[in-house]
Image (tube, rainbow, N blue to C red):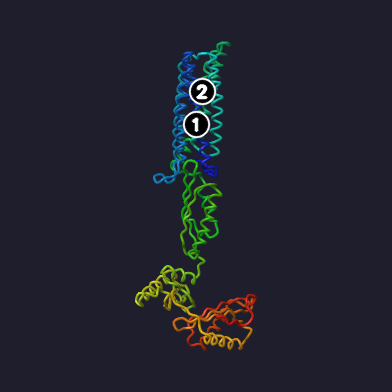
Amino acid sequence: MAEPLGSQANQGPQAGHEKRLVALISVVAAVFLTLMKLTVGLMTGSLGILAEAAHSALDLVAAGVTFLAVRISDRPADHEHTYGHSKVENLSALFETLLLLGTCAWIIYEGVQRLLFGYHEIELSWWAFAVMGVSIIVDVSRSRALARAARRYHSQALEADALHFSTDVYSSMVVIMGLVLVWAAQWLKLPWLQHADAVAAIGVAGIVVFVSWQLAQRAVESLVDGIPHGLYDQVMEVVGSVPGVLRVERMRLRRSGPETFADVTVQVGREVSLEAAHAIATSAEEAVRNILPGSDVVVHVEPVRSAQEDLITSVRLLAAQHGVGAHSIRQYALPTQKAGTPQVGVELHLEVPDYLSIEKAHALVSDFEVALQHARPEVSHVVTHIEPVGEHATTKVFEANAKDTARVLQALAEWQEQDPTRCQPHDVHVHRSEGELIVTLHCSVGAETPMVDAHLIAEQVEQALRRQLPDLGRIVIHIEPEASREEGVAPTT
């Protein structure tokens, strides 16, 4: 089973420094034990102690591999390793577990040989007890330090190193127990105790094989991008519950050393603005990090038509996709049905680039109409009014003369006399451009006036002005509640 993906909140330069320091201390300890056992073994001629020296030399190789793995894994991502180098830790953990399994296989083989084919003479010496005692103290200290760092930084390489040296503690204790039992067998005249050393060694080796096999499985799972059972569904559920997410299209998780990467594709309504879609993606990232703290999350957003999308929204979005603007959209019911679905008609204004010829503009609008009827089968009739996108921003505007301003103010006053309570015009500005009048004004209405009625009042003002001002071109009327109005008509020019 895959190892649970943990937090990367403690990853960083300080974490890398501490991991390297712990691994380096382990290397130094391995060098010390190897030299000590080799020296004592050569001085006493003890084959058992020389064998322990060889064992410590193997530990030195393992510690060196771990140190190199931790050092390499902390390198930043580059063009050849875009996810970083953290999988080196998983490789190191796999190497050490294979080393442990090989050692355990040899111990079990030797134990069975001694049980089946006779007693192996064990040399009693106080040097042996001293060397094993020092080994236990050193191995306990470094295995605890390695395990603590492995848990804190979620490092498989340090975890494997800690497991390796914790097994050394057990093996050293077994050696001491074997020496004690040999002494007891000689003192108490109990020959069967001679086999206790081999039985204990086989038992410890069996435990180490079990633990090593579990660690090897986790290392392999990380190397092949395995994740814990149930985690996929858990992340899918929390991302799918983010407001604005219609569906989680795809989700991938992978672990590289202590780091976790998540790639998520979510679908949102295509009517959502870019800013709102970005906010939804950010919320999805936070949802993933609530489960996998510190993970590297990338959320890709795909726009799709939602079940709640109305016809007017579909028209606006399809127009934008065709590079045209839509306004004055109206829909109306038709007395027909198609495949049991009531049909509707749509009429609207489409703004096309003003540099297009009528032939190209008509072709563009026709493509839009076909796309609309394909996307919304209930639309069986479309009528479009084609118009240029609008005036050029470079159009020169000049202030109108006093006579033009007086004409506009007189027209407003006459309209207001009909019903002074409807609207209070103010902030009137009059300009002239290309032979036409341009008028802007504010119109105050009751604060509780419905928006539909307020818009109707603005249209009535515009119609009244156009009836009396034949040269009126563009007019912009800003509707506001009475609390914002200035008293009376302000003839500002």
Q: Which mark is residue 235?
A: none
Residue under pointer 2: 201
**Whether residue 350 can be seen here:** no
Query: Which picture quadrant has residue 392?
Result: bottom left
Tell me which label, 2 or 1, sits earlier in the chain: 1
What is the spatial separation of the Cα atoms under label 2 and label 1, in whole angstroms?
A: 29 Å
Taking depth in this image into account, of 356 and 109 the one nearest to the observer is: 356
Residue 488: percent from left, percent from top? 63, 82
340 is higher (above) or lower (below) than 54:
below
Residue under pointer 1: 24
The residue at 46%/15% (across/down) is 42
Taking depth in this image into account, of 212 and 291 the one nearest to the observer is: 291
Residue 19: percent from left, percent from top? 51, 36
Please, what secondary structure does the residue beneath circle 1 have?
A: helix
Taking depth in this image into account, of 384 and 20 the one nearest to the observer is: 20
Residue 423: percent from left, percent from top? 61, 82
**Whether residue 19 can be seen here:** yes
